[in-house]
């Protein structure tokens, strides 16, 4: 029955009952009393219905739906429809959730949902093998008690998750994990961990291969170069017509030797781990020596001005730092036309750590090249780089050396105006 019909019927019945009661009341001489009794009975009936409906709403499993008549009929029908719709939506959501859990469960990467306190809320199957989360027992555990690595604790607390973190698996230290954290919702975080053991092994194989090849080439190259130098210096009449060829061979063998040396150095510093030797490096003295070497290389064609804080020393690897700093200084000379200015600066940076900066007013670099400049063998102008004795590996070495000292390299440049290369190190490295 439609709502409007139900109400019409109810009102008709009410009116009929009132008229009837009033008539019977008139006959017995007490019409108002009869009307009052009728009203109380009606109220009691509706209250009883309301009680039954409330009981059914609260505990639908224990109490049957009340039989409906009159105005209660459309109301109960509506409640039933709403309930059925709610149940259907819940079933659909459960199915979706189960599907989502099944798909993330099948992922080979560990996925863990963390609450706003960093406690484990949910995890997939891979997280059991990679992180050691157990079926039920791990729910509510803080993730930094599951992954106890201090580097991970710092990473979790830092809230700077732009870069992923590499750590050993808490289940097996020979397994390397790349961990990434993605914040979402209100303080929640999603942790993903990927097994990169194989990738790292391949990277090691590649690095070792480059290092081995370079090492193997080094000796024959030294021999060839030695003979070529002897031939060049001999001034033998028989060799006179070969002189240009010998000169070129000598030049190319020197270039190859430089590449081999740079490749060997790069494969050493590419590992990312800290260098074995860590000492107090007298950077101002090192830079003074570098200025002398730079002036020699420049041959008076540039004005080289050092501004050095003589007291500032750095805890690190002297040999590596010297290669990095000299690469920057020699680049400035090679890419600055005659008469240009080069300034070397070593000072305590605004962020509390020591910084080294090389500024030149040379040819500068187009902005499109800046992001790729520190890649191996990346050159803006291959011809210019080669003719000035470049290997294309210098800035790759600089980047790795700086990051091995937990520093960062900033490059600013404008074509035709010059470039500034700045390496800043953390305050803890100061001594
Ligand atoms: P290269 O041995 O070719 O100099 P680097 O890795 O040291 O290799 O530098 C990469 C490229 O960056 C260079 O080929 C050059 O084009 C550019 N570059 C480096 N330093 C400077 C600079 N101070 N001014 C202009 N360009 C530079």
Image (cartoon, rainbow, N blue to C red):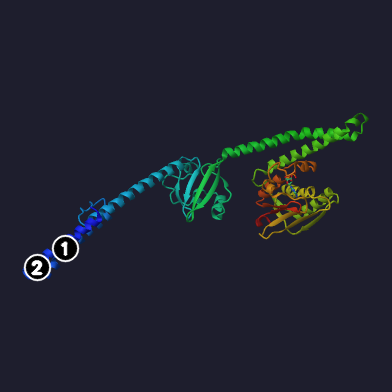
Q: Are marks 2 and 1 in contact (CB under 8 Å)?
A: no
For image coordinates 85% across by 35% down, the residue present is 247
Q: On screen, 86 above or below 106?
A: below
Could you tell me which secondary element the residue under label 1 belongs to? helix
Determine whether, in the image, residue 236 is placed left or right of residue 11.
right
For image coordinates 34% across by 47% down, the residue present is 88
Q: Is residue 92 visible?
A: yes
Q: Quadrant of residue 17?
A: bottom left
- Most extreme residue toward the right is 237
Determine whether, in the image, residue 98 is placed left or right of residue 241.
left
x and y percentages locating residue 395 in the rendered image: 71, 46
x and y percentages locating residue 169 in the rendered image: 53, 43
Q: Is residue 431 visible?
A: no
Q: On screen, 99 above or below 425?
A: above
x and y percentages locating residue 123 in the rendered image: 45, 46
Q: How many marks?
A: 2
Residue pointed to by mark 2: 25
Quick one: 309 or 430, which is closer to the camera?
309
Could you tell me which secondary element the residue under label 2 belongs to? helix
For image coordinates 9% across by 70% down, the residue present is 30
For image coordinates 66% across by 43% down, the residue present is 270
x and y percentages locating residue 121 in the rendered image: 44, 50
Q: Which mark is residue 187?
A: none
Quick one: 45 or 308, which is closer to the camera?
45
Residue pointed to by mark 1: 15
> In whole angstroms, how far apart are the C-alphas of marks 2 and 1?
15 Å
């Amino acid at each position: 029955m439609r709502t409007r019909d139900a109400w019409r019927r109810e009102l008709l019945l009410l009116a009929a009952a009132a008229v009837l009661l009033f008539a019977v009341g008139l006959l017995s001489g007490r019409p108002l009393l009869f009307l009052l009794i009728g009203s109380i009975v009606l109220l009691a009936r509706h209250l009883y219905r309301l009680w039954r409906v409330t009981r059914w709403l609260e505990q639908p499993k224990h109490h049957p739906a009340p039989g409906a008549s009159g105005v209660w009929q459309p109301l109960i029908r509506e409640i039933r429809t709403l309930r059925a719709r709610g149940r259907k939506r819940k079933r659909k959501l459960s199915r979706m959730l189960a599907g989502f859990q099944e798909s993330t469960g099948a992922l080979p990467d560990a996925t863990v949902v963390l609450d706003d306190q960093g406690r484990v809320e949910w995890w997939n199957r891979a997280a059991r093998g990679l992180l050691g989360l157990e079926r039920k027992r791990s729910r509510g555990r803080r993730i930094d008690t599951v992954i106890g690595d201090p580097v991970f604790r710092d990473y979790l607390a830092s809230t700077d998750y732009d870069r992923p973190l590499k750590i050993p698996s808490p289940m097996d230290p020979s397994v390397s994990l790349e961990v990434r954290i993605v914040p979402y919702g209100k303080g929640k975080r999603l942790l993903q961990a990927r097994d990169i053991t194989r990738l790292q092994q391949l990277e090691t194989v590649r690095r070792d291969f480059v290092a081995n090849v370079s090492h193997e080439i080094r000796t024959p190259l030294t021999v060839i170069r030695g003979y070529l130098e002897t031939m060049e210096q001999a001034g033998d009449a028989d060799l006179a017509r070969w002189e240009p060829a010998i000169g070129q061979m000598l030049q190319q063998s020197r270039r190859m030797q430089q590449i081999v040396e740079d490749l060997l150095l790069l494969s050493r510093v590419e590992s990312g781990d800290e260098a074995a030797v860590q000492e107090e490096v007298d950077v101002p003295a090192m830079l003074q020596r570098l200025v002398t070497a730079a002036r020699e290389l420049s041959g008076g064609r540039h004005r080289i001005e050092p501004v050095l804080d003589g007291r500032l020393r750095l805890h690190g690897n002297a040999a590596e730092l010297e290669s990095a700093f000299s690469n920057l200084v020699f680049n400035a000379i090679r890419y600055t036309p005659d008469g240009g200015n080069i300034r070397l600066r070593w000072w305590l940076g605004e962020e509390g750590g020591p910084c080294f900066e090389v500024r030149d007013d040379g040819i500068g670099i187009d902005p499109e090249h800046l992001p790729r400049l520190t890649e191996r063998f990346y050159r803006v102008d291959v011809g210019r780089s080669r003719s000035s004795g470049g290997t294309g590996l210098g800035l790759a070495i600089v980047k790795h050396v700086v990051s091995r000292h937990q520093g960062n390299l900033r490059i600013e440049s404008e074509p035709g105006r010059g470039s500034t290369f700045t390496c800043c190190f953390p305050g803890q490295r100061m001594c």
